[in-house]
Image (tube, grey):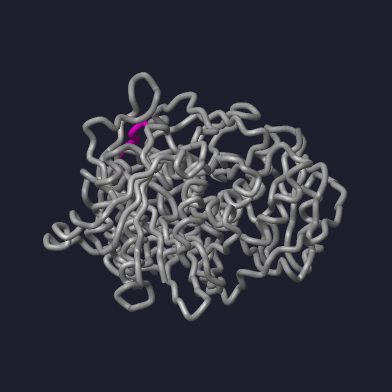
Amino acid sequence: MKLLVPVKRVVDYNVKVRVRADGTGVETSGVKMSMNPFDEIAVEEAVRLKEKGVATEIVAISMGVAQCAETIRTALAMGADRGILVQTDVELQPLAVAKLLKAIVDREQPRLVIMGKQAIDDDMNATGQMLAALLGWPQGTFASKLTIEGDAITVTREVDGGLETVALSLPAIVTTDLRLNEPRYASLPNIMKARKKPIQNLKPADLGVDPAPRLTVVKVSEPPKRKAGVKVGSVAELVAKLKTEAKVI
Amino acid sequence: MTALVLLDHDAHGIKQPSRSAVAAAQKLGDVHVLVVGSGIGAVAEAASKLPGVGKVHKADNPAYEHPLAEPLAALLASLAPHHTHLVAASTATGKNVMPRVAALLDVQPISDVAEVVDSDTFVRPIYAGNALATVKSSDARKVITVRAASFDPVPETGGNAQIEDVPAIEAPSVSRFVSAELSKSERPELTAARVVISGGRGMASGENFHLLDPIADKLGAAVGASRAAVDAGFVPNDYQVGQTGKIVAPDLYVAVGISGAIQHLAGMKDSKVIVAINKDEEAPIFQIADYGLVADLFQALPELAAELERG
């Protein structure tokens, strides 16, 4: 079974982002970039499925500027077999990404696409669901466990009150939540090996997709700051203040 | 302009985040709501009483017993031509279904809206709430999910809308509900509670979370946790408050043994009053807490329980 794993290049999760003074976005120049953490979980799951003999080939896909090739290399070093880079300087929003991915799915004919539930930059949580809709495939979002048997996949999902399990017919889309697995670190030999794995370079036009954004960013601003409060000396003082000052209990 | 709000419901009725979604939708124009399920007469009745709702669309069919994304999205897309905005709360169901609806309509969805500027323009948090983006949609129809914590829910009663039956939409059967394993709790849901008390890594064990119980009982609070406490296996994941867990904004948030990682703050910093109890006076949580108590939680929690008991 062939698997597709889309991976996004984002500001590293350890970086404290700063809003640009002109309000056009957050500062990304000179900032460490990494693979979106939820996508790492997706790559890990795909590699585990290959190690179990369920998957035969893993194709990692990234979209955006030329440096997204580095994100694909990370996936290749973790165990993906080859990569596809859709290169563009246009800001890609989830609808455009879903359309580009659909075009790649039409070419590659995978049985399963595993992807992060959301990217930690725009926090949209949309692309997987949108790709599923465009393909007419079922979706298992926010997965914390998955089992493949024959032509079906069972996905345990993290929902508000706990867990929900659904059975989907393949082909299908799965989006990963945090508890699905703990991604491995790529070993040095595997990083070296990944350099030789092929990455195909495409443009949105090659896939017949207009990637123009539908949302215009009017401005990006800092969230309102909370002012630091007071320290209280004892539990009794705390309770008294909550009663008489804050009036919340 | 008419917005259609998908209402999330369970055995207890319409979920509070959906009432916040109705409040957000009222800023967009007329409001219709959609209730979907099997044997949902009482839910539709309750929906008709929500103030400001013009019409309740009721899709009552055994096919909709469980809120699966595939049939739900097909149903919503079929109702889209009569509405300018399709809206849901950012609950597990809303997040699962709405982007799928958007793609069926060739629309770029707008997730987690925290403010409605006008019918095309919305403010939403990005980068785990470390920045706010104001975005303007060029799509003819908008598909949005609403951050419930940012909108005061409409009351449960006051309206008197008519209820209209909506037929089920034929959709290929590609997904099937298998089972649900929901945490049983007598306490309010995290996202709906007026008071939340959360424990962090400082709690040291799952057993110690019971120290929060008498306080939660006394205050009618929901119990939450930081991601560190969840990752350490102290409590299940559905306790998690934070960017990757639940976003809450109660009247009172009590953080116990929580240092205040960015990812946790993103989930609770809109609370009206924040209390932090931590033995490390340098903990970042104190920078956003209205009331900070530097203390060993194993002494402070029993004291707090006793103090509240005294009344």
Q: In terms of image quadrants, where is residue B308?
A: bottom left
Where residue B43 sits in the image (x, y, percent)?
A: 76, 60
At x 40%, y 60%, the residue is A4
Say if A19 sits above or below B69 in the image: above
Where residue A68 sits in the image (x, y, percent)?
A: 30, 43
At x 73%, y 45%, the residue is B80
Q: Quadrant of the N terminus of chain B?
A: top right
At x 77%, y 40%, the residue is B52
Q: In terms of image quadrants, where is residue B25?
A: top right
Q: A140 or B193, which is in the foreground?
A: A140
Q: A26 or B169, which is in the foreground?
A: B169
Where residue B151 sits in the image (x, y, percent)?
A: 59, 39
At x 30%, y 56%, the residue is B257
Residue A143 lies left or right of residue A37; in this view the side is right
Magenta-tinted stretch:
A227-233
Q: How many marks?
A: 0
